[in-house]
Image (spheres, rainbow, N blue to C red):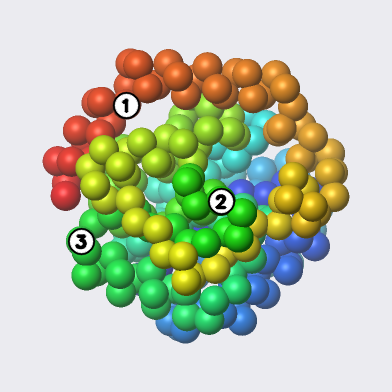
Amino acid sequence: MTLVVLCPSRARPQQAKECYQAFLDTRHMTDSEMFFVIDEDDTSGYDVPVFHVKRGRPGMTDALNAALPMVWDREIVGFIGDDHRFRTSGWDTYFTDFLRQKGPGLVYGNDLARDDIPTQIFGSSVIWQALGWMALPTARHLYLDNAWRVIGDSVNRLFYMPDVVVEHMHPTLGKAEWDAQYRAVNAPEVYSADGQAYETWLADGAAADVEKVRAVL
C-alpha cells in the first residue's frame, strides 16, 4: 500500500461522510486509503472506514497517535480533519510523486486559508516512525501544525504545494457552524495549555526530535 489518510473525528458522522466522499471523488491511485479514527465510546454511527481506538483526552492528538502504528507499512501517512475537503483531482498522485522525487519529507496542500502552517499534512512513514508520533504528544489538539512546521523546516523537508487544494471548512473561516466539538477543543483553556505544551517542547524536546528525523533522511 502506498498512501493512507487518517482523520480523527467525534460525533460528526455526516461531516465524515462528506469528507470521505470528497476523498473518493478525487483520488487517482486505487490503493489510496482513508480511515476515520473514532473513540470506542462514540456511538454516532459512522458509515465510513473506521479505526476504533480507546478514548483519550479531548482533541485529536491521542486518537491520531493511537491509530498511527496501524499504518506503519504504508509509504506515506497523511492527516486531515473531518472539516477538510480534497478538491484537486489526483491530489494523492501529486503528493506521492513529489515525495518520491524529493525523498522522505512532509508535504501539505493549499487549504484556501493560510500557507504558513500545514493544517493538513502528508509525510513519509519513516519520519513518523522515527518520531514515534504523528501529533505532538503533550498537546491535546492545537499547535500540532506548528510542531510539523518546526520539524520540517529544521531538516529542510517541509514542502508546500499551492496547486493542490485541500480546503479547510472551519468555523473561523465562516465555512462551518460552531458545534460542541469545535467549542470544546478551541476553548481558551485548551489554547493556553496546548500553547504551553508547544513552547515547552520547543525548549526541551524539539531538538532531539529533529535529530531523530534527520537520522532517517
Q: Circle 2 sits on which residue?
A: 114
Mark 3 near mark 2, Cβ–Cβ under 8 Å? no
Label 3 vs label 2: CA separation? Answer: 25 Å
Label 2 vs label 1: CA separation? Answer: 24 Å
Q: Circle 1 sits on which residue?
A: 206
Mark 2 near mark 1, Cβ–Cβ under 8 Å? no
Under mark 2, the amino acid is: Arg
Q: Residue at x 30, y 74 (%)?
A: 97
Lower position in the chain sequence, tag 2 or tag 1: 2
Q: Would residue 147 be found to the left or right of residue 191 on screen? A: left
Q: Circle 3 sits on which residue?
A: 103
Is residue 65 among what the camera can see? no
Q: Would residue 17 be found to the left or right of residue 132 on screen? A: right
Lower position in the chain sequence, tag 1 or tag 3: 3
Q: Residue at x 52, y 17 (%)?
A: 196
Q: Nearer the viewer, residue 196 or 52?
A: 196
Mark 1 near mark 3, Cβ–Cβ under 8 Å? no
Q: Secondary structure at mark 3?
A: loop
Q: Secondary structure at mark 2?
A: loop
Q: Nearer the viewer, residue 30 or 106?
A: 106
**What label sits on residue 82 in the rendered view?**
none
Around disc 1, counting alpha carbons within 10 Å, would you say few (fewer than 14), some (14 to 19), or many (20 or more)? some
- The location of residue 138, given as percent across then percent down, is 48, 24
Under mark 3, the amino acid is: Gly
Under mark 1, the amino acid is: Ala
Q: Secondary structure at mark 1?
A: helix
